[in-house]
Image: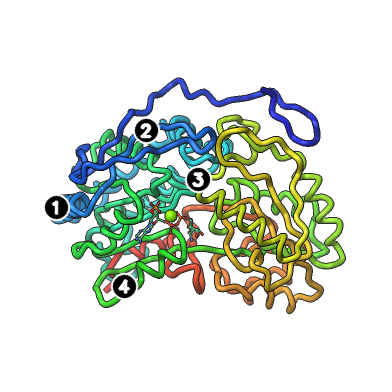
Amino acid sequence: MAKKNTTNWPLAPAPESKDHFKLKPQYELFIGGKWQKPKSGKYFDTINPANEQKLARIAEAGEADVDAAVKAARKAYDNVWSKMPAAERAKYIYRIARLLQEKARHFAVVESMNGGKAIRESRDVDIPLAAAHFFYYAGWADKLQYAFPGKNPTPLGVAGQIIPWNFPLLMASWKIAPALACGNTVVLKPAETTPLTALLLAELIQEAELPDGVVNIITGAGATGAALVNHPDVNKIAFTGSTGVGKLIQKSIAGTAKKATLELGGKAANIIFADATIDQAVEGIVNGIYFNQGHVCCAGSRLYVEESVHDEVVRKLKHRMKSLVVGDPLDKNTDIGAINSKEQLGIINKYLKIGQEEGADMYQPACDLPGKGYWCRPTLFTNVAQSARIAQEEIFGPVLAIQTFRTVDEVIQKANNTPYGLSAGVWTDKGSKIFNLTTKMRAGVIWANTFNKFDPTSPFGGYKESGYGREGGVHGLGAYLNLN
Ligand code: NAP
Ligand code: MG
């Protein structure tokens, strides 16, 4: 079937092939370098959210399995990894990076099938960035003294890592690469709905011949994550996910010696001044909220437009939205893939209703949606009050809340008026405005005249309820080291 968008220029289908590999029907737990059946005896299905078809059966790790994984990581830490010369550790990490590049297409296809994101995103963003993180941190492994002059950096021990479903392989790489470079061993739990690329990464780690137990991948739901957090022999928790679960984790590790980094939710302000290049800004808005279905913690979900250009920005944005292709994540023309789960679609739809009940005006282009699977049209709301729930709460979907402003002070005040502080964007022709805003906005990352750009050399993390600690760059090393 030809892809339709509402400009009525049908595009010929351009599906990415998935015939060059086969997923296993069932995946076990990757513990101590081997695939082990769960002691719990339990399994769950993982599906493709674009068609609701089952992709594989996945083992569910119970407490005894978590314990076995932590023991394997401890043994590998004590006997092998912490003793290995750093330059040798680096060689393994480089090998993972190179293998990821070799298998990039395979990983991209599986990421799109399991997570619902458009192949364009997984192929051009997720997988190359994941490999880049391994390359970057491999380079640091034998230079930690230079990263922290005058200090004596030593690893923390066993790191328990818990990641969400929006960037499954990227989050795994983001967490595993610095941990290994600093000499720690790892137990990682991917999200329940997107375990597949983490399991493929485990296969790749086997192929790279990492010593047994240095990386352990255990699948399961929230209870598996909680068991990992509460395990007494874990030295560090690295968590990316919702603010709600982040708070629970903080409570459970209070009073222990465990270190933690928490990367939590966001409600980023994207600010457009009248002197900005409007067409470029409109592309940035689309990139900031609609690509990856808005499943981005730092998505530009609040748009502040200088009043004099509001009508022009909204008109151009609506026009651009009509040309966005919503549909099969494996089609190379697709801009917006499937919502990751039925549960998440329910949350998004709840907010669409709340937005309308709050009196805001909703706009969606009239594009066709596939019959099966979980889908949401790109959506914007105008006439949004600052106190509206759609302007305050994280929706985690392709939904934009638009407000206006007249002065710089007003927009800074509005942008900061949120419990979150993960990211923000500024669009203007004036460098002085950029510097003024970036020094006054409480957000961990601020993009100027661009949005959602990532690089392994750049630290990332939040203020306020968006969490604490930094990942990426030299800062990301510090989170996995004792610095005495
Ligand atoms: P989530 O429900 O908090 O889940 C994140 C991870 O924690 C999943 O692996 C989850 O397992 C696990 N988990 C659930 N309950 C747990 C518990 N009690 N103890 C330990 N682990 C537990 O978040 P999500 O819905 O997957 O992801 C969306 C959220 O992540 C959004 O709020 C988003 O802003 C945030 N996020 C933040 C960043 C950042 O860098 N700041 C990046 C990406 C996403 P299950 O999969 O089984 O639930
Ligand atoms: Mg969850």
44 relative to 409 in the view: left or right: left
Q: Secondary structure beneath disc 1?
A: helix
Distance from Cα at disc 1 to Cα at disc 4: 30 Å
Distance from Cα at disc 1 to Cα at disc 2: 31 Å
The kind of residue tagged 2 is Ala
Name the disc covering residue 150, or none: 4
The residue pinned by badge 3 equals 341
Residues at discs 3 and 2 in contact (Cβ within 8 Å): no
Name the disc covering residue 56, or none: 2
Is 332 or 165 nearer to us in this picture?
165
Distance from Cα at disc 4 to Cα at disc 3: 48 Å
Quarter containing the N terminus = top right
Residues at discs 2 and 4 in contact (Cβ within 8 Å): no
Which picture quadrant has residue 14? top right
Q: Secondary structure beneath disc 3?
A: loop
Q: Quadrant of ligand 2?
A: bottom left
* Residue found at x 78% / y 36%: 6
- The numbered mark, 4 or 3, whose residue comes first in the sequence reads 4
The kind of residue tagged 4 is Gly
